[in-house]
Image: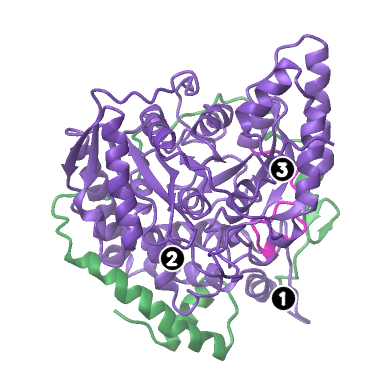
């Protein structure tokens, strides 16, 4: 059997369309790679039959001379936050174990309609709450990367850690992710792949397990900027079932790709130069400026004065929305039910939620409940929403002097699993550079830049104006072409 | 502002999460660490700033006022709706008795 696992989305789509190979051969190749990679724990369930059925349909359509979709013949991993018809959907929580939806999320429907198939449901931090993929009920996900000369298990980032691990290890050419406060970009940076969170509202949230509804956005994770552009086109689009869905046409992002940045201004936010940021990351940021200058862009200094307050505001707003969204898990309609002997309805709710939610989820529900409670609502929640408005205003003002912003994606490279568990706050700080764009609903992407001295990937982040995914992708492409990031993890799994 | 064990117990009860003594005691310093840290938002001058409720300004759409406007989400789906219920009886969700 030929090995197709080094191919990305574009290569597979084009090879299937031209008849160089069949979609079935590709699906078989990736199914085998997934089956061989149990040690990564990237998947919660695998669905090889789904990948094969989708591939057979594409091969039959091609034989019949029908038009093929944007993702025709590409088998992907689906983050287990998307409801998939008849396939267990858990959000990596015990409380949803065994839940098999009778419906399909809009984003996954769009991908199947475009000719993609599903390799399986990818592991994640429980309810997408975490930055290291250590809060899943179904166990930690391992990064395929290791520090040079060490066997320590490394974090693939979170919450889309199954997605990043699967794409970086080449057991999937691409995967869906979701980003509430960095959950696409930070894992992409940790594993040397690309990931883009589009403008809030581009991808429908219908059928995506809700964490913080005003922030949640789906997006693609893949190994090149082109592959992200193709997959985002297939995922995005207006959906009347999501009241916050953008009623706009999906631009032809793939066709619009251009690494020529002449006439573009790239903003460098001075407040992103923070204490505790790794020297290697500051160095890669400098290198990124050089690359974009080389692509024809002008580099300008900008100020985003409320950057420091974005993360604390996020840790009020996101838990507040989560505490409300997660009220639905009550042991009545779906998922787990704990019914102690002689328990009444209220006891059943409390026992079910105690047994079903993990520690980090409980912590955030408690914070959210507290900041929304009478007497504290103004001091915490309303204040955070006002700070959020100021963070968004900072960006609006920056767009007067630049077209796209370049920043690091994370303050550190990946860390060993278990090394940041002492204090929830140190884990939260991972998303310090990612959260501001989330609060403002802006498109933002991470692209791989370089390796640290001990062989771990580092990413650079691009943030764009609302609806300007093209500008973000183009700047990402300019970096990709100059970084020539070709490193791949050595197979140990 | 900081929380004590009694306050955490009250919040847990409001959130319908059963917590034992040991868990409550573990949560107190963790929640206080987070609350102390978010306290810095108080430094920000927010005079005249409206709280943000939507990042992309837009009007809420109304769907057509017809039965089964979306066949996927319309009526006639009782079996599908109950399919994942831990206890479905006689076409209803089953729960412990709530009337004395």
**Residue A290 higher or lower than A425, as above or below:** above
Q: Residue at x 71, y 26 (%)?
A: A115
Q: Looking at the rendered structure, which numbered label has been put on residue A480?
A: none
Q: Which residue is mark 1?
A: B100
At mark 1, the secondary structure is loop
Q: Secondary structure at mark 2?
A: helix
* Dominant secondary structure of the residues highlighted in magenta in the image: loop
The segment highlighted magenta reads A88-106
Q: Position of residue A233 (x, y in %)?
A: 54, 27
Mark 3 to mark 2 CA distance (whole Å): 29 Å
Structure colour scheme: by chain
| Residue at numbered disc 2 | A368
Q: Nearer the viewer, mark 3 or mark 2?
A: 3
Residue in front for this viewpoint, A429 or A32? A32
Which circle marks residue A84 in the picture? 3
Chain letter matching colour green = B
Q: Chain of mark 1?
A: B
Please name which of the two marks, 2 or 1, marks the residue nearer to the observer.
2
Q: Residues within 10 Å of mark 1 (few under 14, many from 20)?
A: few
């Amino acid at each position: 059997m030929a090995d197709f696992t080094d191919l990305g989305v574009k290569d597979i789509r084009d090879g299937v369309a031209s008849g160089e190979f069949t979609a079935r051969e590709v699906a078989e190749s990736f199914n085998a790679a997934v089956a061989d990679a149990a040690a990564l724990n990237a998947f919660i369930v695998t669905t090889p039959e789904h990948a094969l059925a989708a591939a057979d349909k594409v091969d039959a359509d091609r034989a019949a001379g029908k038009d093929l979709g944007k993702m025709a013949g590409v088998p992907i991993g689906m983050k287990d936050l998307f409801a998939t018809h008849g396939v267990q959907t858990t959000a990596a929580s015990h409380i949803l174990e065994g839940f098999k939806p009778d419906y399909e999320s809009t984003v996954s429907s769009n991908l199947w309609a475009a000719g993609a198939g599903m390799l399986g449901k990818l592991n994640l931090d429980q309810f997408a709450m975490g930055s290291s993929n250590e809060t899943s009920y179904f166990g930690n996900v391992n990064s395929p990367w290791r520090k040079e000369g060490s066997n320590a298990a490394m974090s693939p980032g979170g919450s889309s850690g199954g997605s990043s691990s699967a794409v970086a290890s080449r057991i999937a050419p691409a995967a869906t992710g979701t980003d509430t406060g960095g959950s696409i970009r930070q894992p992409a940076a940790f594993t040397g792949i690309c990931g883009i969170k589009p403008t809030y509202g581009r991808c429908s949230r219908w059928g995506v397990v809700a964490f913080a509804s005003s922030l949640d956005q789906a997006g693609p994770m893949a190994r090149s900027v082109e592959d992200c552009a193709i997959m985002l086109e297939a995922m995005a689009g207006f959906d009347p079932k999501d009241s916050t869905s953008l009623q706009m046409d999906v631009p032809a992002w793939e066709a619009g790709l251009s690494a020529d940045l002449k006439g573009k201004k790239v903003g460098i936010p001075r407040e992103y130069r923070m204490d505790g940021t790794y020297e290697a990351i500051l160095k890669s940021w400098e290198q990124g400026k050089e690359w974009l200058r080389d692509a024809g862009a002008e580099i300008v200094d900008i100020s985003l004065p409320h950057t420091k307050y974005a993360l604390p505001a996020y840790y009020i707003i996101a838990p507040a929305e989560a505490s409300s969204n997660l009220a639905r898990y009550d042991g009545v309609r779906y998922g787990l039910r704990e019914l102690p002997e002689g328990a009444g309805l209220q006891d059943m709710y409390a026992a079910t939620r105690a047994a079903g939610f993990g520690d980090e989820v409980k912590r955030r529900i408690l914070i959210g409940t507290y900041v929304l409670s009478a007497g504290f609502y103004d001091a915490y929640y309303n204040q955070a929403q006002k700070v959020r408005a100021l963070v968004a205003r900072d960006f609006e003002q920056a767009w007067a002097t630049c077209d796209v912003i370049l920043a690091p994606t994370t303050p550190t490279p990946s860390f060993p699993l278990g090394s940041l568990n002492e204090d929830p706050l140190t884990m939260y700080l991972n998303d310090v550079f990612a959260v501001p764009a989330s609060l403002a609903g802006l498109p933002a992407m991470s692209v791989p830049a370089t390796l640290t001295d001990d062989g771990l990937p580092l990413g650079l982040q691009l943030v764009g104006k609302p609806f300007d995914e093209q500008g973000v992708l183009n700047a990402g492409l300019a970096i990709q072409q100059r970084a020539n990031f070709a490193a791949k993890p050595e197979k140990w799994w | 502002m900081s929380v004590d064990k009694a306050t955490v117990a009250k919040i847990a009860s409001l959130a319908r999460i059963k917590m034992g003594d040991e868990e409550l005691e573990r949560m107190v310093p963790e929640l206080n660490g987070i609350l102390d840290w978010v306290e810095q938002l108080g430094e920000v001058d927010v005079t005249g700033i409206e709280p943000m409720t939507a990042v992309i300004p837009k009007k809420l759409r109304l769907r057509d006022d017809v039965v089964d406007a979306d066949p996927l989400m319309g009526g006639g789906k009782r079996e599908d709706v109950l399919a994942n219920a831990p206890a479905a009886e006689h076409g209803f969700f089953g729960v412990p008795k709530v009337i004395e």
